[in-house]
Image (spheres, rainbow, N blue to C red):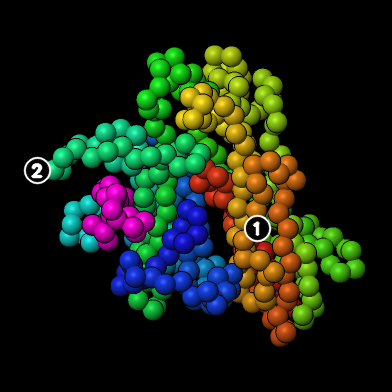
Amino acid sequence: MRRGLLAVSLSALGACVPDLDTDEALVSTPRVLAVVAEPAESRPGTAASYTALLVDEAGPREQGVLAWFYCLAQKPLAQLGPIDPQCLDRGAGKLSSIGRGLAVEGMVPKDACALFGPNIPAPEPGQEPGRPVDPDDTGGYKQPVILGFNAGQGDQLVLYEQRISCDLPGVSAATAAEYRLRYHANQNPGLRDVVAERASGERITLREGDVLEVSVGEQLTLAARWAECPESDACGDGVCGPDEDRVSCAEDCATPVGCSGQERYVWFDNQERELTVRRESMSVAWYNTAGSYAQERTGAEEGDTSLESDNQWTAPSEAGDLTLWVVVRDARGGVGTLQLGMQVR
């Protein structure tokens, strides 16, 4: 399982044993490396679009047979899998079709906060009422989105979790009102660029789609860099932060504008029973069609203000053209991607 994205075969779901010797960073068969939702966080009953980053050993794929669905079944507490098994069976009536293709547009189910959030869900016929879902570590809730595709080796599933905006449960009316004013929906992170540093000390800044020529077996230090977000809020800085709202700063918050780096956000501390401000952590996944990384995953914790994450990449021992992808995910489930080309000579 990768945070926010899980890929399994239909027949192996529930009995999947990870192969610890598999290089997850190496793309050798068709795979969905990421799903990007716009917006990154949605209110139930509002529109959202989804785009899959589908790739194979030759690079990005512009076409693919993909089918998208919303899962409409709350996972039982005793179920160890990531979703209710009914959402793997079209005949169970727990799937809502979104569309087909690499990119689709859907309407987030109106009852998402009851099925997958803090609202008490309606009971199934003849059953006792269910219980609200507990929030994740960031205080958020997620609507499961299932993407099915055929990779030429049997049907595959990708589970993506769309963050949904729900009201804060079990608090005073004043706290709930303050939360609604100060909490701003997550924005997808983005990668400004990747800086490649050669052993000689030469540094090359690479942006989306750039191609770098490297030598056979050459080792590079790669730094994936994202935008700097304000450490404190100032009205007029172009970012609607957790200490601003549409009343105190209409300039930034009338239509809230987020930041594509490590955003600060309002979080309810359930232990202290108060609202506080946190900063997102970042997770970076590295992929290539040839070569090898020192680490498959890197990232930055909440307190890390470096604005980048480093890795080492070694070019393959044979010449050829290849592709690298970097996928960044923030703590609230936002996703950003960047693609680079390498010419090994």
- Find residue 292 and report its horizontal and vertical position in percent: 67, 74
Residue pointed to by mark 1: 298
Q: Which residues are magenta?
A: 69-88
- Please tell me how crowded label 2 is: few (under 14), some (14-19), or many (20+) other residues with Cα within 10 Å: few
Q: Is residue 73 magenta?
A: yes
Tell me if I can see residue 236 in this picture: no
Name the residue nearer the viewer: 54 or 84: 84
Q: Amino acid at mark 2?
A: Gly
Instruction: Give the CA separation, mark 1 to mark 2.
Output: 48 Å
- Please tell me how crowded label 1 is: few (under 14), some (14-19), or many (20+) other residues with Cα within 10 Å: some
- Find residue 44 and report its horizontal and vertical position in percent: 35, 36
Tell me if I can see residue 54 in this picture: yes
Rendered image quadrant of residue 215: bottom right
The circle on residue 126 is 2
- Find residue 98 and report its horizontal and vertical position in percent: 32, 51
Q: Is residue 100 magenta?
A: no
Q: Residue at x 47, y 53 (%)?
A: 4
